[in-house]
Image (spheres, helix red, strand yellow):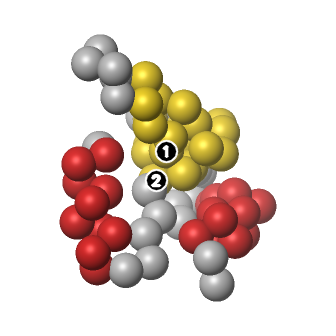
């Protein structure tokens, strides 16, 4: 299964991750002051109004790379 397929399954019912979570956008563009351009897989808001950024990775090496994205 590809990350995009996992993303779409979670986006269809994001509350499976946390009760009260509301999806705001898939592939949310996040600009950076230093010119880096990045996309967050899932952008949501929790029941307390906090922003939630969800980045999906299928492998350990990809997880390490994701730390630089955040």
Question: Whole-Å distance between the Cαs marked 2 and 1?
Answer: 7 Å
Q: Is residue 20 left or right of residue 13?
A: left
Percent x, y of residue 42: 56, 49
In the image, which disc is placed on residue 54?
2
Which residue is painted at 72% across and 63% down in the image? 8
Which residue is painted at 44% across and 37% down in the image? 38
Disc 2 crowd, CA 10 A, few/some/many (<14, 14-19, 20+): some
In the image, which disc is placed on residue 40?
1
The residue nearer to you, when weighing 14 against 63, is: 63
Q: Quadrant of residue 11?
A: bottom right
Percent x, y of residue 49: 48, 31
Callout 2: helix, strand or loop?
strand
In the image, which disc is placed on residue 63?
none
3 in relation to 43, above or below: below
Q: Is residue 37 left or right of residue 15?
A: left
Q: Quadrant of residue 32?
A: top left
Which residue is painted at 70% across and 71% down in the image? 5
The residue nearer to you, when weighing 48 against 41, is: 41
Q: Is the residue under label 1 in contact with that under label 2 (CB below 8 Å)?
A: yes
Q: Is residue 49 left or right of residue 15?
A: left
2 in relation to 31, above or below: below
Question: How many numbered discs, if any?
Answer: 2
Percent x, y of residue 61: 27, 75
Callout 1: helix, strand or loop?
strand
Outermost residue toward the top? 33
- Between label 2 and label 1, give the one nearer the viewer: 1
Residue 55 visible to an observer of this rendering: yes
């Amino acid at each position: 299964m590809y990350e995009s397929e996992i993303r779409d399954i979670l986006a269809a019912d994001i509350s499976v991750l946390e009760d009260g979570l509301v999806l705001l956008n898939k592939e949310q563009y996040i600009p950076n002051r230093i010119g880096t351009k990045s996309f967050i897989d899932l952008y949501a808001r929790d029941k307390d109004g906090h922003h939630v950024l969800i980045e999906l990775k299928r492998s350990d090496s990809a997880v390490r790379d994701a730390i630089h994205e955040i």
